[in-house]
Amino acid sequence: MSIIPYEPKSIDVEYEGKTKNGKKYSYSANDLSICDGFIIRYIVQPLLKLIPYQLPANIITIVSNSLVLFAYVIAMQSSRGKYTFWFAIPILIFTYIIGDCTDGEQARRTKTGSPLGEFLDHFLDCFVTGELVISLLVVYNIKNAIIVMLSLTVAYIVQAVAFWERYKNGHMHFSRFSSTESIIGLTTLITLGVNKKIRQYASIVLIESVPLFERVFPDMAGSTGLSVAEAVLLVLTVFGVINIILTLIRTRGVSIRFLCYIILTFVVAAISSVMHEDHLHLPYLTIALFNIHYISTLLSSIVTKTKDHYPDFFLAVFMSIMFILRIQNEILIAFYFLYVLVSVGIRASWFFVQNRQYWVWKNPEPEDSVAN
């Protein structure tokens, strides 16, 4: 089988039904990703011949995303020095990539694209972002709180601006180096972490102290140096910032609500990193959940074609007060974690309830087979 260069394509899907507010749902994407093209052409399309027509795309979405969670659990074992099932990480994540491409193709094939399907797909992708970036941080034992804050925050903003473009311009845009390529790159780095020599090399300190870090974050004295792994992650973060700028230029404008999100996500990330510099799992969760909460509201606005929302001011103000007053109370910390976790759960559950008519356990038979 000869490999034919992939040609960029535009994907347009229009669902026959309507959203909850009576507006017709449609999905449009301009896919320039090289990896997506090869995966769809040489893996997904042949695979679709084996997938039952009755299998809903949403089931494929949920199952494939759960594989990344398993990979994340395996990666977390590295903090205990356990690498027994490390070989499974690239297998699980590559299978997820195939599933992530397959669910859309199955939805188009069965003409079952829906607001719920788009929301579910992208909402679960938010968790994948956090799982992969945090896995990388843990595998290479990156404890520089500044790098943790910047890398995880920028990763989520990259995702958010992609959805903002969908909201503003009505279509998704996948560049040559898009989400699939990013996932493959992160997975490669995570997988290489099984090698002890690579981890040792990655931990070599390149710079004992970065003056910029010292000036901007004077309270984080333990996070002003830079190791090889942290330098690589910083470079990747810079590329992420460039991606954000280019997307916003292409989108031609942001609302005051979206601008508030960008500002507040850095505020929340900075405060949580400073307050919990010695317990980085707390900033991991805080940054991830704050971003997932906002992105879920943006996704809801996209598929229902309603006005975008402001980010969660309560959490930012609450954390700011704790930071200013130097409060380190475990009960209050547990409260704001519980608050944002419950907020995310309520947002997702409410959208599902409002769009439950789109959920099916089995696709209906195709019209031609029913007619026969």
Image (cartoon, rainbow, N blue to C red):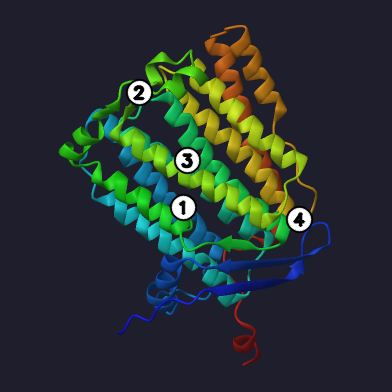
Q: Amino acid at mark 1?
A: Asn
Q: Residue at x 63, y 44 (%)?
A: 295
Name the residue that disc number 1 marks.
Answer: 65
Say whether disc 4 or disc 2 marks the residue closer to the N-terminus.
2
Q: Nearer the viewer, mark 2 or mark 1?
A: 2
Residue farthest toward the front in the current orientation of the protein: 211
Q: Is residue 243 left or right of residue 34?
A: right
Asked if one can make out residue 14 in the rendered structure from this viewpoint, the answer is yes
- Spatial CA distance of label 1 from label 3 is 12 Å
Q: Residue at x 37, y 34 (%)?
A: 137
Identify the image quadrant of residue 6. bottom left
Q: Which quarter of the rendered picture does the C terminus lie within?
A: bottom right
Asked if one can make out residue 63 in the rendered structure from this viewpoint, the answer is no
Name the residue that disc number 3 marks.
Answer: 130
Q: Is residue 155 above or below residue 325?
A: below
Q: Amino acid at mark 4?
A: Thr
Q: Is residue 104 above or below residue 289?
A: below
Name the residue that disc number 4 marks.
Answer: 304
Q: Residue at x 53, y 71 (%)?
A: 106
Q: Amino acid at mark 3?
A: Gly
Residue 104 position within the rendered picture, expressed as x and y whole percent measured from the top left: 54, 67
Badge 4 vs badge 2, beta-carbon distance below 8 Å: no
Badge 4 vs badge 1, beta-carbon distance below 8 Å: no
